[in-house]
Amino acid sequence: MFRNIGLSRITAVSIAAIALGLSACNRETAEAAPPAGAKAAEAEKAPTIPDFTLGDQAGASHELYKMTDAKAIVLTMQGVGCPIVQKMTPDLKAVQAAYEAKGVKFVMLNSNNQDTVPMIAAEATSFDIKMPILKDEGQKVAEPLGVVRTAEVMVIDPKSWKIVYHGPLNDRLTYGKERAAANNNFVPDVLDKMLAGQQVAYVHQQTDGCIIDFPNRVRG
């Protein structure tokens, strides 16, 4: 009776079962893997952000190293008309509402050469942004930090002026895709650790956003 089944058929069924098991394992590994582009502190040393003094959309001046009363500083790259920044703004405002009262300062930085202060002010009004948007004239702040796109967020520790996180606010928005809610809230997670006095390992990961043109940047 078993002669009609054949060894080759049994082997084929076994191989198929093993393949399905490996496929499921690979899916679990991929889901557990860190976000693409993430680099731990061992792979890249946390950079120090130099002091700067810049004006905002209302004409007020802000010096970074005078923000010593902050528990943390969240600096977000802004660009006039960038759809990803516009769509992430409600999320950023929600984080601001949750953490500003806890001593976290929020500022935005515009390093687009084509964006003027009046344009930035109009964008802030349109999207009801209640945080300073600093104009980075000459790209003197963003260029040395290796910024590439708008929507990049940096979390700064005012005790050391180290950038402890550099990447997206969360994973709700990617190119051409938008979730109803984020699966990972990167910046709030970092802020929670900092406010709890925990050690934060530096992470730098890729951010989806609008390319910022740095005409003086040396390209490899």
Image: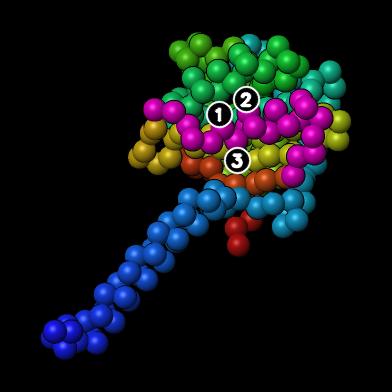
Q: In which quarter of the image is the N terminus?
A: bottom left
How many neighbours does mark 2 have within 10 angstroms: few (below 14), some (14-19), or many (20 or more)? many
Image height of 45 relative to 89, above or below: below
Magenta part of the chain: 180-201
Along the viewing direction, whichever of 12 and 48 lies nearer the viewer: 12
On the image, which quarter does residue 180 sit in?
top left
Residue holding disc 2: 108
Q: In this orientation, which residue lies closer to the viewer: 75 or 7?
A: 7
Q: Image quadrant for the C terminus?
A: bottom right
Q: From this viewpoint, which residue is outermost toward the front?
A: 1
- Coordinates of residue 33 in the picture (x, y in percent): 54, 53
Magenta span includes 44: no
Left or right: residue 146 compared with residue 160: left
Task: Give the residue at x 55% y 29%.
Answer: 78
Residue at disc 2, secondary structure: strand
Q: Is residue 185 left or right of residue 86?
A: right
**Residue beneath disc 1:** 78
In this rendering, does residue 161 appear at all?
yes
x and y percentages locating residue 202 in the rendered image: 73, 45
* Res. 167 mark: 3
